[in-house]
Amino acid sequence: MDRSYWEFGGTGRFDFPSNIVRVTGGRGSECLLIFGSEKTALYETGIAYSQDKLINNIHAALLDRGRTKLDYILLSHSHYDHVGGMPYISREWPQAQVIAAEKTKKVFASAGARATMERLSKIAVDYFGKEGDAYKLDGLRVDRVVRDGDRIDLGDSYFYVLETKGHTDDCLTFVLEPQSIMFTSESTGVLRITGTLSPEIVKSYNGAIASAQKCIAYGPKQLMIPHYGILAPEDTISYFAEFLKNAIEIKNFVLECWDSGMDYEECLNAYEKKYWIETMTGEQSKSAFRENARPCVYGILKEFGRITDDKSLQKKAAEKERNKEK
C-alpha cells in the first residue's frame, strides 16, 4: 500500500467538472451537488455535526446557478458518515427525493442500527466538532429504492445505478452519464491521506472483489472516490488494480494470522497494528476504524472456511487458554 495520496490524479482531487460542485460541510463523506439541465442532485450528506455548513454551502451553490430547489439526495450506503446530514437536508428541502438501496431502507427502520449511527455521530462531535453540534438522526428515510440498471434523470444527464456490495450490503455506485464519471462506493476502496488505498472491506471480501470487477466491466472514463475526490481519467484502471492488490494483501494477512495459531482477538489486534496509522486520526477515529475492522476480520475468516460461527472463535480461544496452562 505504497501509492501516494497525491499520486492519483494529474490534477487536484477537487477539480470537478463545471456541473459538479463540492459542498462538503466537514469531516465525513465528500458531499457534491450535481447540476443537470432540469434537476439537481446532492450526492451524500456527511456526518450530522457538519449539517449547518453543508446546508449553507448548498444554498450558495444553488443560488450561484440561479436555482433554489434540490430534487434528489443520493446515498451510497447507510453508514453514519454518509447519511448523518440527511434528516437536516430533508427539512430544508422537503421535496427532495431520497434515493438509496432497499437494504438502506431496512437499516433505517432498525432501532438498533439507528442507535449505533447516533452513537458514532456523537463520537464524531467529540472528535471533529464542538459542544452543541448536532448528532441526532431523527427522520432517516428512503423515498425511492433503486437497483442495478436503474436511471435517475437530471435532464440532459442521468445517473446509472450499480449495486456494489462488499463494504456493506447496501452499497450503490452511481455513474453520471454521458460524462461516464463513476461515483464509486466504499466497496471498491477509499484513498487515505496517509498514502494508502484502503479496501474498506467490512461485509464481504468476495462481494467487494465482484463489485470491483463489475465496475471495471462497466468501463467508466473517470472515478470519483468517496472521502477523497476525483481522479484523472488516466488513473481509472490503475486505481482498480491497486484496490485488487490491496484487498488480496489484507485477505492473505488475516488468514496467515489465523493459520499461525492466533485466535480472533489476536488477529484483530494484529490487523489494527498493521493497518491503523496514527495520522489517520485527522480523517477517522480509532474507534470507527475498529468498528469496521472487527467485521472485516470475522468475515474473511468465515468466507475462507477458517470459522463457521462464533462458536468456532470461542473454541479456538479456549484451546489457546488450555495450551497456556500446560
Image: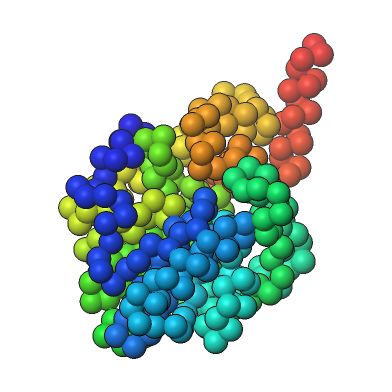
Residue at 27% across / 53% down in the picture? 231
Give the position of the N terminus as an image quadrant. Answer: top left
Q: Along the line of sight, which residue is nearer the eye, 215 or 192?
A: 192
**In-front residue for pair 57/139:** 57
Viewer can see residue 151: no
Query: In terms of image quadrants, where is residue 88?
Result: bottom right
Q: Is residue 193 left or right of residue 17?
A: right
- Pinpoint residue 47: horizontal percent, then vertical percent: 58, 57
**Image coordinates for residue 27, horizontal then vertical, percent:** 52, 50
With 41 as the anchor, is 7 left or right in this view? Answer: left
Q: Residue at x 78, y 21 (%)?
A: 321
Q: Quadrant of the C terminus?
A: top right
Q: Decide which of 271, 309 is in the foreground and name it.
A: 271
Identify the residue shown where x is 39% and y is 71%. Answer: 61
Seen in the picture, residue 66 relative to 185 is either above or below; the reply is below
Q: Residue furthest top?
A: 326
Specify how the rendered protein is coloured. Answer: rainbow
Residue 50: quarter of image: bottom right
Q: Is residue 171 above or below residue 236?
A: below
Residue 126 showing in the rendered view: yes
The count of marks equals 0
Q: Position of residue 229 (x, y in %)?
A: 35, 54
At 26% from the left and 40% from the top, the residue drawn is 7
User: Picture coordinates of residue 46 (x, y %)?
Assistant: 53, 60
Quadrant location of residue 14?
bottom left
Asked if residue 290 is positioned above or below residue 156 in the image, the reply reads above
